[in-house]
Image (cartoon, rainbow, N blue to C red):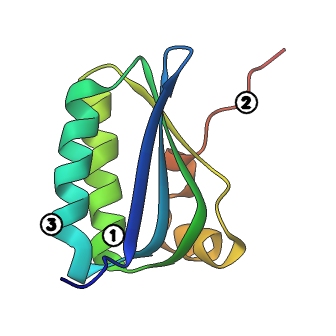
Amino acid sequence: MAKSKLELRTEHAEGRTIMHVGGEFDLEVASQMRAALHSLIEQADSRVTLDLRQLKYIDSTGIGILISLIKALHARGVSFDVVHIPPHIRKLFDMTGITPFLMKPESSI
């Protein structure tokens, strides 16, 4: 069996669920990612963070799955943000207009 090109690791700390996503997130691994995110949604703490530090590539399928994740977590009242977005991935998020939905709002002090 070939090694998956998508790497996922989840941890729970201080009321937060962190999913580390690495490798390539595209059509080929969509079913694997959907299954992992379904589990994440069901077991999520009060806040979910995706750490994309090791993400090398994402296509439109991956972006669609992220949007579905945002909607599902919002429906459950779970806060969501994305951290450590590589510059080339951030550029794609900016071009597609989803960046504001991925970033934790800054507190107004």
Secondary structure found at label 2: loop
Looking at the image, which is closer to me, 61 or 21?
21
CA gap, disc 2 and disc 1: 26 Å
Q: Is residue 68 above or below residue 62?
A: above
Residue at 63 percent across and 68 percent down: it is 90
Instruction: Name the residue tied to disc 2.
Output: 106
On residue 29, which mark appears?
Answer: none
From the viewer's perspective, is 79 left or right of 103?
Answer: left
**In the depicted structure, whether residue 68 falls above or below residue 87:** above
Provide the secondary structure element on which disc 1 rests.
Answer: helix
Indicate the quadrant where residue 87 lies.
bottom right
Query: Mark 1 vs mark 3: which is more N-terminal?
Result: 3
Three-letter code for the amino acid on which mark 2 is drawn: Glu
Identify the residue at horizontal 26%, vertical 26% (top origin).
Answer: 43
Percent coordinates x, y for residue 102 in the rendering: 52, 48
According to the picture, the residue beneath numbered tag 1 turns out to be: 62
Say the numbered circle drawn on residue 31: 3
The residue carrying pointer 2 sits among few (fewer than 14), some (14 to 19) or many (20 or more) residues within 10 Å by Cα, namely few
